[in-house]
Amino acid sequence: MTVSSLTMHHVFMFALSLILLATVIVGTARVPRAIGYLMGLAAIPNLVQSWVVGNEGFSVSWLAGSLSTVGLPLMLAWSIWLLIVAWRMEEPDQPGKGQPERGPTTLLS
């Protein structure tokens, strides 16, 4: 295997994992669905580029440049948006914070 084929295999797997993560985010209620849609859109240029290099054996310069022009801003947008959403989320309730602990319950006969 050549270096470019290994790199494009990595790009393909990254795009596939982005699509799977986007699917999970779209299906959950804690994170805005639009972040998942942006993730999916950002994965498409990576899939196209890995497919072109896999079939042609080399990257077409005008295609690689245009894919980067589309994919990188989308990647940056969903990354920053997800960071802001995660930063603003409230922490889940901890059993030891502000609530008295309950001991074991016993049944009285």
Image: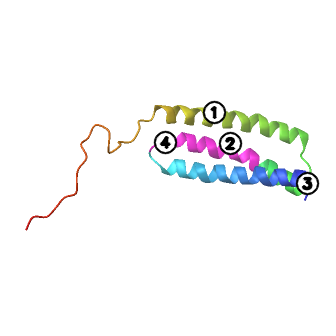
Crowd tier of the residue under label 2, counting other residues whose Cα lies within 10 Å: few below 14, some 14–19, many 20 or above: many
Screen quadrant of the C terminus: bottom left
Q: Quadrant of the N terminus?
A: bottom right
Observer-nearest of 17 and 63: 17
Residue drawn at (73%, 39%) of the image: 71
| Residue pictured at 64% horizontal, 46% vertical | 40
Q: Amino acid at mark 3?
A: Glu
Q: Secondary structure at mark 1?
A: helix
The span from disc 2 to disc 1 (Cα, nearest Å) is 9 Å
Residue at the spot 65% in from the left edge and 49% down from the top edge: 18
On whether residue 33 falls in the magenta region, the answer is yes
Q: Give the residue type that dot 2 points to.
A: Ala
- Mark 1 vs 3: CB contact within 8 A: no
Which circle's residue, 1 or 3, is located before the other in the chain?
A: 3
Which residue is under mark 1? Answer: 77
> What residue is disc 2 on?
42
Height in image: 5 above or below 35?
below
Residue at which label 3 appears: 56
Marks 1 and 3, how far apart in space? Answer: 30 Å
Q: CA distance from mark 4 to mark 3?
A: 38 Å
Q: Are marks 2 and 4 in contact (CB under 8 Å)?
A: no
Report how far apart the C-alphas of labels 3 and 2 lie in the structure: 22 Å
Q: Earlier in the sequence, mark 2 or mark 4?
A: 4
Q: Magenta: predominant secondary structure element?
A: helix
- Disc 4: which residue: 31
For the residues bearing labels 2 and 1, Cβ distance under 8 angstroms: yes
Residue at 63% over, 43% down: 39
How many neighbours does mark 3 have within 10 angstroms: few (below 14), some (14-19), or many (20 or more)?
few
Closer to the camera in the image, 40 or 12: 12
Q: Residue furthest left?
A: 109
Closer to us: mark 2 or mark 4?
Answer: 4
**First along the sequence among labels 4 and 3:** 4
